[in-house]
Structure formats: structure tokens, C-alpha cells
Amino acid sequence: MREFDVTVPAPAELGLALIGVPEGSDVQLQLRLEAVVEGVLATGTADVELSGQCSRCLEEIDGEDSFEFQELFFYPGREVEEDERLIVDETVDVEEPLRSAVALELPFTPLCREDCLGLCPDCGFQLNDDPSHNHGDKVDPRWEALAGLADEIEEKH
Ligand SMILES: [Zn+2]
Ligand SMILES: [Zn+2]
């Protein structure tokens, strides 16, 4: 059994559309490799930085997270299924297992906070800044024009 503790730069597009690991940021990888009958079992934990955008209010989100993965790499020469992996040139490539773990655990609709209020549907105002924001009773602009006309008529009398 061998254990590794390495820091590697994050590959591109590690994550989902709205949130992920910034390319090139530090990924702290703790990796344990165990020889088993069919190959090498890799168990890893990756501590990463996260950056993204709130799906409700579009505010930037920064954070850190930790992802775990485990993958069995078969000895070369074996017929493997599409989702199975081989040891290639005596190395195991844990990028794909890490990718799957990250994509599986990240939320599709990340939030800056649980109770994010989002944006005002009428004007795009950031409602988290002022939850009491509202536009009062809205008057259709065409009615507004008529109301103005009525005032004018009244003034003439
Ligand atoms: Zn938000
Ligand atoms: Zn508004």
C-alpha cells in the first residue's frame, strides 16, 4: 500500500456550468493506492477551491469543498468495460474519477445562501440587499395615460 499527498493544479472544466473548481487552482490530493488481486484500488480525497454564481441572484460564490472518490484500476491486458479503467504505463489516472465525484456532488443550482431572495422580477434589483423592495400597485402604462387625460379634462372645467 502506498500513500501520496500532493498538490496539483486543477484541470479545466472541473465542475458544472454554474459552479466548479477554478482552472489552475490548487487541488490537494490525498491518495491511497492498494494492490488487490485484480489491480490497484485508488482511494482519494481532494480538497479544492470552488467558485461560481448563485442561480437565483447571480452573485459570485466562493468556497472550499472536499470530494472523495474510489476507483479500481485493473492490471493491463484485461478486457475492460467502458466504465472500467486500466493501469496504463504503470500509472493510474485519477482525473476522471475525481471529475465524476465533483460533478455528482455539486448542486446544479448553487445558492449564495439557503434563503437567497433572488432578483426582483420587474427590475432586477438584488432583493437580498433590501427584502422590502417592491413597486407598489402597478398601473398599466396605458391606464396611466388615460388617467393623465382625465386630469387634463378636469382642469379645463
Ligand atoms: Zn443568491
Ligand atoms: Zn424591482
Image (tube, grey):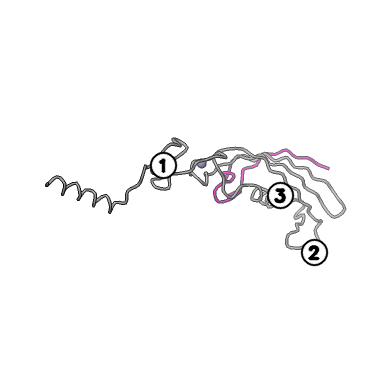
Q: Is residue 7 left or right of residue 22?
A: right
Labelled pair 2, 3 in contact (Cβ < 8 Å): no
Labelled pair 1, 2 in contact (Cβ < 8 Å): no
Q: Residue at x 45, y 35 (%)?
A: 129
Measure how far apart labels 2 and 3 are at the Cα level: 20 Å
Q: Compare residues 40 and 117 and report the one nearer the observer.
A: 117
In magenta, the rendered stretch is 1-24
Q: Is residue 16 magenta?
A: yes
What is the secondary structure assignment of the residue under circle 1? loop
Give, as a three-letter code, the residue at label 2: Glu
Q: Residue at x 15, y 49 (%)?
A: 153
Q: Compare residues 70 and 93 and report the one nearer the observer.
A: 70
Q: Point out the image quarter for the N terminus.
A: top right
Q: Which residue is mark 1?
A: 125
Q: Is residue 142 magenta?
A: no
Of mark 1 and mark 3, the one earlier in the sequence is: 3
Mark 1 or mark 2, whichever is nearer to me:
1
Mark 1 or mark 3, whichever is nearer to me:
1
Ligand 2 closer than 8 Å to label 1 CB: yes
Q: Position of residue 30 (x, y in %)?
A: 73, 40
From this viewpoint, which residue is outermost toward the front? 157
Q: Compare residues 144 and 25 and report the one nearer the observer.
A: 144
What is the secondary structure assignment of the residue under circle 3? loop
Of mark 2 and mark 3, the one earlier in the sequence is: 2
Q: Which residue is mark 2?
A: 79
Q: Which residue is mark 3?
A: 94
